Image: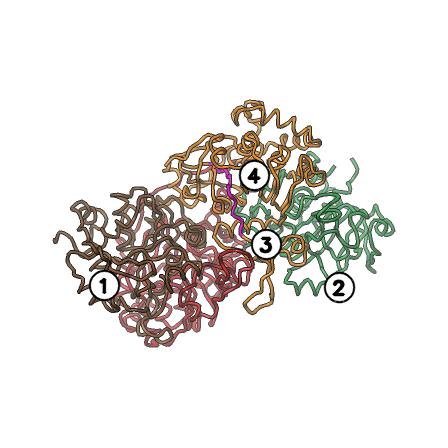
Chain colours: A green, B orange, C red, D brown
């Protein structure tokens, strides 16, 4: 086994975005492992909520879906979706949301709906699920995604989940809370500047600035103080491989 | 008044060609047995509404029962795509389907408006997204109060002709208790004109009345009750059985071609009379592996006054 | 994180002069102990919102704490009038109070809008009544969809500065379970900026986590937790004690004059340090007579997966 | 003891308005006794709902208020008020509602808010509670009230609970469901004609047409087929006195 895989680096990097005491809306797969890793390391008071309505979940094993019974057994509370979305998410009670998608653009808008024309798509994707709500109502969102030119167009084909649409100020005026905080890829970490445009903040040891630019659909600004991502510690890797994803479902 | 039927009788009485149908359950308590019976009875032209179409709508689409899908997330949860759904959208196989698309909160809010007999309800989604442009049912309303918001999106009530929902236990007349993930099950039952309730177990009314705060679905909204153990397999019933992930992976494999879906339907739906025969085709190991350990909730004292 | 305080500390930390305050509980689980502590600490200028002001707001009004009441039914439930409330409205004793009036559904809908961070919610009340004419906050909105309704009334969100709510049991950090009549307690807790939770019993987190569907109030909305047995007397706590009707009749008698209310407050509020001393003034017979027989709910199996 | 009191006659008469299988929103006091009497005689399948959110209550004793614990213990379901009012009442799931009030007028509008001017009232009444909703959303409403001229003005001082405001057609056009069905007083039974105006349908044995007119604030139409109210049966009286209100709290 290598000391760490690309996915394991993304997981450990994503975990660092979480602060102790944060309430986070968790997705399955990689975000779930990142949240559980944070909870077992620097953020023991992390509160995990799933859009299925489980509040303060404490899963005994890796959930197969966001509706897995392990998310309800031993949770602090379970509520109908009208409430997980209404009383929690829309009410601003969730700090961090994880988002996925097929495309993310310069303003952090995410597309998980269609590739191509909406009415005659090349690829029909699953759609929003709760993503539109998560992007609109959490205080900060984090995206974890492979870094390829197709996934990073200058403008997405369909805005499923609004980022800094028209800039940070415009987002605020639209009544949208928070906004994209970080995009964690297999090449680096991207953040958003004062105007709401994505820039390169850190590069993973395995990658270069040129490679990142090559995999991005527009001329990407690079931070003056662009840093190198810290590699996973042996303790983090042991937690992931032994406890959080022992069958390597998401990390191999 | 007992509303007990077998699944065949309940579906026959409740469902008609061309209806708008909502099978409730967000990943949990999905009414698979009912869905298979709908396929067996060969309904056509259904508008199939559901936040997460899941395997059950993929199978209904593959079987040709569905003309339109109203949804918010069309995937095989934790596995990947809904291949029959995509084939219908992208290649019109077995025939084209129409889509009406929301986000999760939008769709459950539509049910809530329906349950409350309101024409619409507001929500703080869709602003800044491309939904409003592509779905005429999502509209903007002026905020009549002072405050930072000038406009707010609204979604219209959804009142399905028929809803089919699952619960762990109910009386013969349909007062039902459910626990674990509730999803949008209760809102769907209140919003629909006709409701089929399918449960793991029928219990005495005393059981229900001993804990009224857990009775989320009252008999007054239920038309037909079906006792159908394992009726949510391969999804799950909290406290009764877990999700059978093998079935989700098998469907992913089988549904790579339209022919593959037909083979699967022939074996698991058309080839069996009812859910009992379906279950008999599973191996005992497979059912045993789904059983959780017992884990009782700390009881409460309602008091006798 | 433990948020445990005694009632004196919690009220001192949570309440300020001039705030909008909501004491939750529809005839059940009324936070009487908290109300009495507010009176003892002598707050002024409060806007007291509550669907059913009940005895507790009558006492707060008699004590001079309240400038405005937001309400939907101001009576002594099952007994008659709220005499101090009426004296303030009709005779400005101890001083005039302002009223903002809704129906029950209007007021709980305001809390629900507040809990969901919506500027307003629609409801099908008030049309044909005189409310709209006398309450500028109730407005009519055009229905943007086809259908029989052209307009629908809306009410604005209510977000109290502080809500004080009761539950049967909670953890030290405030994850609370309640049963029996829920009224508007949960909506009030979610709508308020600051929440004081007062419970019959503090329990281990295991108890709460064993039955998550019963946890209607999560710790994340709670700021202060007070363990206060019999904290709802003379209203009741399902499974713990019944309503002490004698107290409701006594207040009806005592409150016939303003002086009578002051005598009562001197004895039962100002004259005691805390709820414990209040309880010690009751006879044992009286407390014993309120005890229901034990009547456990049939447990559920959440399953350990 | 007399064979029956005025209140007992009103209770038995009100009970007859209920059909087996009706779902009824019950108030405390007299309506509660009427509903329980109906349930124990001709309407065993009567479903009793209280606005406090108890569904299918089966009280072991007379509740002291609409929030009494006996309404929750042994109920079929208990829901928050957002739901008892939203999913049940507003959704049209309740057939019959009982209303009280200080005034009822020619169109069946009820006032339980103020006597006199709203902003400077002579008497400040409790207000709507759920009455406005009950009057707007049930399929039929029944009022039980003493019959006096002050209580039966031609127009109420404040419409708390709309009756046939502007007539039956207008009520319908406003989007209001149902409407007043019967007003049961200590002198007779009043109903509403095709236009929505109250008329005298039956007279109690103890009263006369002239007495009813004398206690009504407008010229009351009398039905051509005005009948005499049937008196309570000994069985009904026994049920009331022995089981439903043994302490005579509401009936003496």
Do circles 4 and 1 both sit on a common chain? Answer: no
- From this view, report whether residue A17 is shown above or below residue D102: above
Mark 2 or 4, nearer chain start = 4
Q: Give the foreground label among 3 and 1.
A: 1
Q: Which residue is mark 1?
A: D147
Please state the chain letter of the residue tagged with numbered disc 2 in the rendered image. Answer: A
Q: Which chain does tag 3 point to?
A: A
Secondary-structure class at tag 2: loop
Total labels drawn: 4
Q: Residue at x 21, y 59 (%)?
A: D186
Give the quadrant of residue D112.
bottom left
Assess whether mark 3 and mark 4 are in contact (beta carbons under 8 angstroms).
Answer: no
Q: Residue B164 lies in magenta, yes or no?
A: yes
Q: Nearer the viewer, residue D159 or A252?
A: D159
**Would residue C267 appear left or right of A117 to someone viewing this image?**
left
Magenta stretch contains residue C289: no
Nearest the eye: C280 or B95: B95
Q: Which residue is mark 2?
A: A195
- Residue with the mark numbered 3: A89
Q: Which mark is residue A69?
A: 4
């Amino acid at each position: 086994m290598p000391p760490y895989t690309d996915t394991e680096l993304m997981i450990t990097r994503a975990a660092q975005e979480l602060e102790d005491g944060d309430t986070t809306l968790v997705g399955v797969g990689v975000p779930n492992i990142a949240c559980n890793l944070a909870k077992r390391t620097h953020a023991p008071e992390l509160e995990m909520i799933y859009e299925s309505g489980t509040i303060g979940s404490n899963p005994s094993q890796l959930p197969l879906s966001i509706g897995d019974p392990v998310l309800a057994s031993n949770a602090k509370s379970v509520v109908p979706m009208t409430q997980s979305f209404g009383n929690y998410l829309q009410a601003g009670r969730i700090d961090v949301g994880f988002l996925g998608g097929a495309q993310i653009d310069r303003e952090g808008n995410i597309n998980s709906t269609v590739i191509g024309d909406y009415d005659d798509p090349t690829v029909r994707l699953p759609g929003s699920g709760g993503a539109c709500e998560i992007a609109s109502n959490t205080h900060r969102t984090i995206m974890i995604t492979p870094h390829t030119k197709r996934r990073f167009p200058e403008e997405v084909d369909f805005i499923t989940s609004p980022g800094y649409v028209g800039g940070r100020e415009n987002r605020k005026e639209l009544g949208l809370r928070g906004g994209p905080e970080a995009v964690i890829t297999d090449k680096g970490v991207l953040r958003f500047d004062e105007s709401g445009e994505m820039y390169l903040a850190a590069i993973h040891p395995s990658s270069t600035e040129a490679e990142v630019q090559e995999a991005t659909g527009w001329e990407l600004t690079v931070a003056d103080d662009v840093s190198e991502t810290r590699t996973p510690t042996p303790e983090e890797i042991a937690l992931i491989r032994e406890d959080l994803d022992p069958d390597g479902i998401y990390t191999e | 008044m007992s509303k007990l039927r077998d699944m065949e009788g309940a579906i026959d009485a409740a469902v008609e060609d061309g209806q708008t149908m909502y099978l409730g359950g967000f990943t949990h308590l999905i009414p698979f047995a009912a869905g298979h019976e709908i396929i067996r009875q060969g309904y056509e032209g259904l508008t199939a509404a559901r936040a997460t179409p899941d395997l059950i709508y993929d199978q209904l689409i593959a079987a040709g029962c569905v003309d339109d899908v109203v949804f918010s997330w069309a995937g095989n949860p934790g596995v990947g795509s809904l291949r029959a759904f995509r084939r219908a959208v992208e290649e019109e196989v077995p025939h084209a389907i129409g889509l009406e698309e929301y986000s999760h909160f939008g769709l459950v809010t539509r049910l809530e408006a329906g349950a409350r007999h309101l024409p619409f309800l507001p929500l703080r989604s869709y602003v800044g997204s491309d939904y409003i442009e592509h779905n005429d049912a999502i509209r903007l309303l002026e905020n009549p109060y002072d405050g930072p918001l000038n406009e707010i999106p609204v979604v219209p009530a959804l009142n399905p002709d028929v809803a089919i929902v699952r619960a762990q236990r109910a009386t013969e007349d349909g007062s039902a208790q459910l626990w674990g993930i509730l999803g949008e099950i209760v809102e769907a039952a209140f919003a629909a004109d006709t409701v089929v309730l399918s449960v793991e177990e029928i219990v005495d009314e005393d059981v229900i009345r001993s804990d009224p705060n857990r009775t989320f679905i009252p008999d007054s909204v239920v038309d037909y009750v079906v006792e159908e153990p394992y009726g949510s397999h391969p999804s799950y019933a909290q406290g009764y059985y877990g999700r059978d992930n093998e079935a989700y992976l098998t469907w992913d494999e089988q549904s790579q071609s339209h022919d593959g879906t037909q083979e699967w339907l022939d074996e698991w739906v058309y080839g069996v009379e009812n859910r009992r025969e379906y279950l008999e085709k599973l191996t005992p190991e497979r059912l045993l592996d789904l059983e959780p350990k017992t884990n009782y909730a700390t009881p409460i004292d309602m008091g006798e006054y």
